[in-house]
Image (cartoon, grey):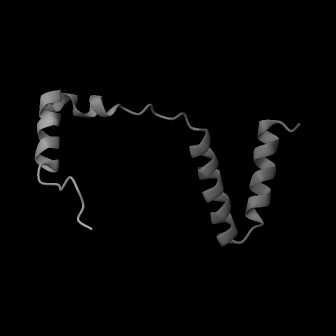
Amino acid sequence: MQSIANLEQTLLENLRQLPPEKQQEVLDFAEFLRQKTAPKKPRRSLKGLCADLNIHITEEDIAEARREMWGNFPREFPE
């Protein structure tokens, strides 16, 4: 296996022999690989995202909203 310095030198030599559009493709691919191996940031929970808004929704609030939404909905469909 090549040493890091030797690998970098070989990579640069090959890169310099490519036309500019192919060099851009190599750069794009290198950035893709870097992002792919970068550690992922943990996602915040939805509860955590809304914690600072000081909103408190109770089960009764949800039940009331359901009653309002479905209150006029016909129970039987006319044929």
Please, is residue 22 above or below residue 65 in the view? below
Residue 54 at least partly seen: no
Q: Position of residue 21 (x, y in %)?
A: 65, 71
The quadrant in which the N terminus is found is top right
Q: Residue furthest front?
A: 79
Q: Position of residue 17 (x, y in %)?
A: 78, 66
Residue 61: image quadrant is: top left
Nearest the eye: 65 or 39: 65
Nearest the eye: 41 or 69: 69
Please, is residue 23 above or below residue 9 in the view? below
In the image, 13: left or right of 63?
A: right
Total marks placed: 0
Residue 25: image quadrant is: bottom right
Residue 21 at least partly seen: yes
Q: Position of residue 70 (x, y in %)?
A: 17, 49
Q: Position of residue 49 (x, y in %)?
A: 27, 34
Q: Residue furthest right?
A: 1
Residue in view at x 28 percent, y 30 percent? 47
Residue 60: image quadrant is: top left
In the image, 54: left or right of 35?
A: left
The quadrant in which the C terminus is found is bottom left
Nearest the eye: 39 or 52: 52
Residue in view at x 35 percent, y 31 percent? 45
